[in-house]
């Protein structure tokens, strides 16, 4: 999905590093569909992974392991994987210099897009590393919360769906003020929303009752996801038609 999604980014109307000359409206709906759940699912799974990892590691061992397994790939990506991407983007913009002439600019440490230093698509790994480390003081509290939360949701089957409310609140309040940048600093809506999803992953993987709940009700959650997707696209389509009708009436 990662490869297909990023391959498709060259053919949709919204911004991307290198765009195809001809765009495709047929790509829009599938790309938006993937957009709704692909990254939240990855952050959720990352939180689960931390919970599983801490079952057999101390916090000190966990910190060292995260820095080694995530920090080193980030550095390698910044200096070896991302620069060719920026270089080809510059060529698409009309640059004529060689890669040997371009590469030293990476070490000027001027952030992209003005400069050539960036983590680009590795932003996800950067965020997961930050979440894993800054949440260390909270992991024990999250385990206790998981125990209380599992008892609370067991009272009514509908309570489990309330896990979406904190993220909805962040999206509605911070989303309009802080568009997603993946730059860590200033990316407050995306940073906080993804961290909440990461924490939910840790909570669910920390409690056997919650893991069992997900297993038992997986078909129900699948249908709920399909229904939410249908509602999302119906509302989005209606909103586009309403906006078009409004502009048409103003023009007349």
Image (tube, rainbow, N blue to C red):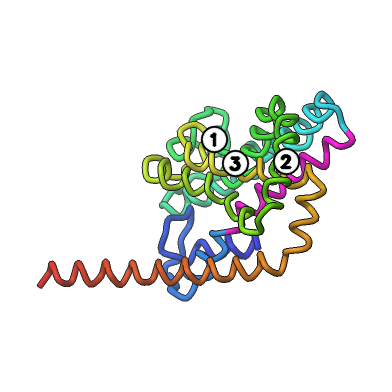
The answer to whether 181 appears left or right of 39 in the picture is left
Reading the image, the residue beneath label 2 is 146
Name which residue lies at 56% across and 51% down. Answer: 164
Q: In which quadrant will I find the N terminus? A: bottom right
Above or below — where is 241 with respect to 57? below
Tag 2 near tag 1, CB within 8 Å: no
Q: Which residue lies furthest to the front in this view?
A: 155
Where disc 1 sits, the SS reads loop
Name which residue lies at 49% across and 31% down. Answer: 185
The answer to whether 69 appears left or right of 78 in the picture is right
Within 10 Å of disc 2 (Cα), the crowding (few <14, some 14-19, many 20+) is many
Reading the image, the residue beneath label 1 is 117
Q: What stretch is highlighted in magenta?
A: 37-56
Within 10 Å of disc 1 (Cα), the crowding (few <14, some 14-19, many 20+) is many
Question: Looking at the rendering, which quadrant does residue 14 occupy?
Answer: bottom left
Say which of marks 2 and 1 sits in front: 2
Numbered circle sitting on residue 218: none
Where disc 3 sits, the SS reads helix
Name which residue lies at 73% across and 31% down. Answer: 139
Q: In which quadrant will I find the C terminus? A: bottom left
Question: Looking at the rendering, which quadrant does residue 129 occupy?
Answer: top right
Q: Residue furthest left?
A: 252
Tag 3 near tag 2, CB within 8 Å: no
Q: Disc 3 to disc 2, how far (Cα)? A: 14 Å
In the depicted view, which residue is nearer to us: 158 or 138? Answer: 158
Reading the image, the residue beneath label 3 is 196
């Amino acid at each position: 999905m990662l490869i297909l999604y990023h391959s498709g980014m060259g053919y949709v109307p919204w911004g991307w590093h290198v765009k195809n000359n001809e765009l495709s409206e047929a790509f829009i709906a599938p790309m938006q569909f993937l957009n709704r759940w692909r990254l939240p699912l990855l952050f959720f799974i990352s939180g689960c992974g931390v919970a599983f990892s801490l079952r057999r590691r101390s916090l000190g061992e966990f910190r060292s392991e995260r820095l080694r397994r995530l920090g080193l790939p980030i550095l390698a990506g910044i200096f070896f994987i991302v620069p060719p991407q920026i270089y080809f983007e510059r060529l698409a913009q009309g640059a004529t210099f060689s890669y040997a002439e371009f590469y030293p600019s990476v070490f000027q440490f001027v952030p992209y897009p003005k400069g050539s230093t960036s983590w680009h698509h590795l932003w996800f790994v950067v965020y997961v590393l930050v979440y894993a480390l800054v949440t260390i003081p909270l992991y024990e509290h999250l385990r206790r919360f998981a125990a209380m939360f599992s008892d609370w949701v067991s009272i009514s089957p509908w309570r489990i769906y309330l896990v979406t409310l904190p993220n909805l609140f962040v999206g509605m309040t911070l989303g309009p003020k802080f568009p997603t940048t993946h730059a860590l600093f200033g990316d407050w809506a995306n940073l906080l929303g993804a961290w909440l999803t990461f924490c939910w992953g840790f909570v669910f993987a920390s409690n056997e009752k919650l893991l069992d709940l997900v297993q038992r009700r997986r078909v129900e959650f699948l249908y709920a996801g399909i229904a939410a997707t249908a509602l999302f696209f119906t509302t989005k389509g209606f909103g586009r038609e309403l906006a078009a009708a409004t502009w048409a009436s103003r023009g007349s």
